[in-house]
Image: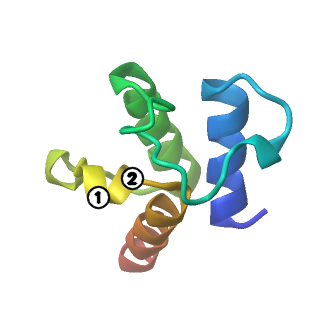
Amino acid sequence: MDVQSTIKQYIVTEIMHELDQNVLDNEAALIEGGIIDSMNLIKLVLFIEEKYGVAITDEELDIDNFMTVNALTKFVNKKIKSAG
Protein backbone atom coordinates (compact mmCIF):
# COMPACT_ATOMS: atom_id res chain seq x y z
CA MET A 1 0.00 0.00 0.00
CA ASP A 2 1.37 3.44 -0.88
CA VAL A 3 1.87 6.25 1.64
CA GLN A 4 -1.35 8.06 0.72
CA SER A 5 -3.51 4.94 1.02
CA THR A 6 -1.87 3.94 4.30
CA ILE A 7 -2.38 7.35 5.89
CA LYS A 8 -5.92 7.63 4.60
CA GLN A 9 -6.75 4.13 5.84
CA TYR A 10 -5.39 5.00 9.30
CA ILE A 11 -7.40 8.23 9.52
CA VAL A 12 -10.60 6.58 8.32
CA THR A 13 -10.44 3.49 10.52
CA GLU A 14 -8.61 4.70 13.65
CA ILE A 15 -9.79 8.31 13.89
CA MET A 16 -13.09 8.49 12.02
CA HIS A 17 -14.03 4.89 12.92
CA GLU A 18 -15.39 4.23 9.44
CA LEU A 19 -14.83 1.24 7.21
CA ASP A 20 -14.85 2.81 3.77
CA GLN A 21 -11.90 4.98 2.66
CA ASN A 22 -14.24 6.78 0.25
CA VAL A 23 -15.82 8.72 3.14
CA LEU A 24 -12.68 10.90 3.24
CA ASP A 25 -11.75 13.13 0.33
CA ASN A 26 -8.00 13.66 -0.18
CA GLU A 27 -8.52 17.45 -0.09
CA ALA A 28 -10.83 17.54 2.95
CA ALA A 29 -9.61 19.87 5.72
CA LEU A 30 -8.40 17.48 8.42
CA ILE A 31 -7.86 19.86 11.34
CA GLU A 32 -9.96 22.85 10.35
CA GLY A 33 -12.74 20.50 9.26
CA GLY A 34 -12.81 18.85 12.67
CA ILE A 35 -11.74 15.40 11.43
CA ILE A 36 -8.56 15.42 13.52
CA ASP A 37 -8.35 16.97 17.00
CA SER A 38 -5.20 17.50 19.06
CA MET A 39 -5.23 14.03 20.65
CA ASN A 40 -5.73 12.32 17.31
CA LEU A 41 -3.00 14.46 15.78
CA ILE A 42 -0.54 13.05 18.32
CA LYS A 43 -1.73 9.50 17.55
CA LEU A 44 -1.34 10.15 13.82
CA VAL A 45 2.18 11.54 14.28
CA LEU A 46 3.19 8.51 16.36
CA PHE A 47 1.72 6.18 13.72
CA ILE A 48 3.66 7.92 10.93
CA GLU A 49 6.92 7.91 12.91
CA GLU A 50 6.59 4.21 13.73
CA LYS A 51 5.33 3.11 10.31
CA TYR A 52 7.93 4.99 8.26
CA GLY A 53 10.86 5.24 10.69
CA VAL A 54 10.96 9.03 10.63
CA ALA A 55 11.01 11.65 13.37
CA ILE A 56 8.62 14.59 13.20
CA THR A 57 9.89 17.65 15.06
CA ASP A 58 7.76 20.20 16.89
CA GLU A 59 8.52 22.70 14.14
CA GLU A 60 7.10 20.30 11.55
CA LEU A 61 3.78 20.11 13.41
CA ASP A 62 2.69 22.95 11.17
CA ILE A 63 -0.95 23.00 10.09
CA ASP A 64 0.20 23.21 6.45
CA ASN A 65 1.74 19.72 6.73
CA PHE A 66 -1.46 18.24 8.17
CA MET A 67 -4.06 20.27 6.26
CA THR A 68 -5.29 17.48 3.94
CA VAL A 69 -4.47 13.87 3.11
CA ASN A 70 -2.64 15.12 0.02
CA ALA A 71 -0.57 17.64 2.04
CA LEU A 72 0.23 15.00 4.64
CA THR A 73 1.25 12.50 1.97
CA LYS A 74 3.60 15.05 0.39
CA PHE A 75 5.11 15.84 3.81
CA VAL A 76 5.61 12.16 4.73
CA ASN A 77 7.13 11.30 1.35
CA LYS A 78 9.58 14.19 1.82
CA LYS A 79 10.48 12.90 5.31
CA ILE A 80 11.03 9.38 3.97
CA LYS A 81 13.32 10.67 1.20
CA SER A 82 15.42 12.75 3.57
CA ALA A 83 15.70 9.84 6.04
CA GLY A 84 16.83 7.39 3.39
Q: CA distance from mark 1 to mark 2?
A: 5 Å
Instruction: Identify the residue shown where x is 47% and y is 55%.
Output: 68
34 or 6: which is nearer to us? 34
31 or 59: which is nearer to us? 31
Quarter of the rendering containing residue 37: top left
**Where's residue 71, x and y in %?**
44, 64
Q: Is residue 53 above or below residue 20?
A: below
Q: Is residue 67 left or right of residue 24?
A: left
Q: Which residue is mark 1?
A: 64
- Residue farthest right in this picture: 20
6 or 63: which is nearer to us? 63
Instruction: Identify the residue shown where x is 60% and y is 26%.
Output: 15
**Secondary element at image label 2:** loop
How packed is label 2: few (under 14 Cα within 10 Å), some, or many (20 or more)? Answer: some
Q: Amino acid at mark 2?
A: Met
Q: Which mark is residue 13?
A: none
Q: Is residue 10 above or below residue 71?
A: above
**Secondary element at image label 1:** helix
**Where's residue 79, x and y in %?**
39, 68
- Residue farthest left in this picture: 59
Quarter of the rendering containing residue 78: bottom left
The colour scheme of the drawn protein is: rainbow
How packed is label 1: few (under 14 Cα within 10 Å), some, or many (20 or more)? Answer: few
Q: Is residue 78 above or below residue 4?
A: below
Q: Circles 1 and 2: CB distance less than 8 Å?
A: yes
Q: Which mark is residue 67?
A: 2
25 or 3: which is nearer to us? 25
**Where's residue 7, x and y in %?**
62, 50
Instruction: Identify the residue shown where x is 45% and y is 26%.
Output: 40
Q: Amino acid at mark 1?
A: Asp
